[in-house]
Amino acid sequence: DQQVKQNSPSLSVQEGRISILNCDYTNSMFDYFLWYKKYPAEGPTFLISISSIKDKNEDGRFTVFLNKSAKHLSLHIVPSQPGDSAVYFCAASEGTGTASKLTFGTGTRLQVTL
Amino acid sequence: EPEVTQTPSHQVTQMGQEVILRCVPISNHLYFYWYRQILGQKVEFLVSFYNNEISEKSEIFDDQFSVERPDGSNFTLKIRSTKLEDSAMYFCASSQTSGDPIQETQYFGPGTRLLVL
């Protein structure tokens, strides 16, 4: 049951360059999307989110783009820093007004090199 | 900054034993969740809880699992008779309220690593 897919298990980017992490989903009922960052032996840390009524949300170095017709979202990190090295999870939920469960992708391991 | 806390950080148990994993959600949050991540796999939803009752549960959350909010601050996950395949990292999460997607953002604790031998 792969409703949320992150097809790149890993990504290596030089410090200062742009990191682009991609996520695809199949469930058209998803209307809220989130990116979490996870270090080893820690819980997922919320980064940024986007509602399905928007196509872009920006917070500092992090921007999330949503293409509903393609069922695709991406996270851009500019400029990338060594501290950004972690596993990034895309997650989605359907419906507000309830305790909506999150469906996670398998994660992309980002390595930012000096 | 308020955060979700979980105890213990690690738990080793024998197959068939009962375990209780504890969580203290963020204080003004009303929705509580448990997720788990088996090593090498993705984070999976187990159960959500609101107003002292289960809102939704996954097929993983069978009769061996139960959740409880025994007091005003703790939220627990009990596994009655652990199996080898219950070995995983268990994450508690909480969110503030519903109706506004931003306020529904779930914040996760650091996790409890459960190892069943």
Image (tube, grey):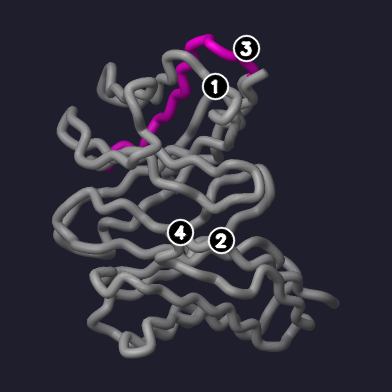
Q: Nearer the viewer, mark 2 or mark 1?
A: 1
Q: CA distance from mark 2 to mark 4?
A: 7 Å
Name the residue carrying label 1. Answer: B83
Describe the element under mark 3 as helix, strand or loop: loop
Q: Position of residue A63 (x, y in %)?
A: 48, 82
Indicate the amino acid at tag 1: Lys
The reply to whether discs 2 and 4 touch (Cβ–Cβ < 8 Å) is yes
User: In the rendered view, does B21 fall on the left or right side of A50?
Assistant: right
A39 magenta-colored: no
Q: Which mark is residue B9?
A: none
Indicate the amino acid at tag 4: Phe
Q: Which mark is residue A106?
A: 2
Name the residue carrying label 4. Answer: A104
Q: Nearer the viewer, mark 3 or mark 1?
A: 1
How many other residues sit within 10 Å of disc 1, few (<14), some (14-19) or many (≥20)? Answer: some
Q: Sequence order check: which comes first, mark 3 or mark 1?
A: 3
Q: Which chain's residue wears label 4?
A: A
Query: Residue at position x 55%, y 40% from top?
Result: B110
User: In the rendered view, does A46 fall on the left or right side of B57?
Assistant: right
* Chain part drawn in magenta: B12-29
Q: Position of residue A46 (x, y in %)?
A: 46, 59
Name the residue carrying label 3. Answer: B14
Q: CA distance from mark 2 to mark 1?
A: 24 Å
Indicate the amino acid at tag 3: Gln
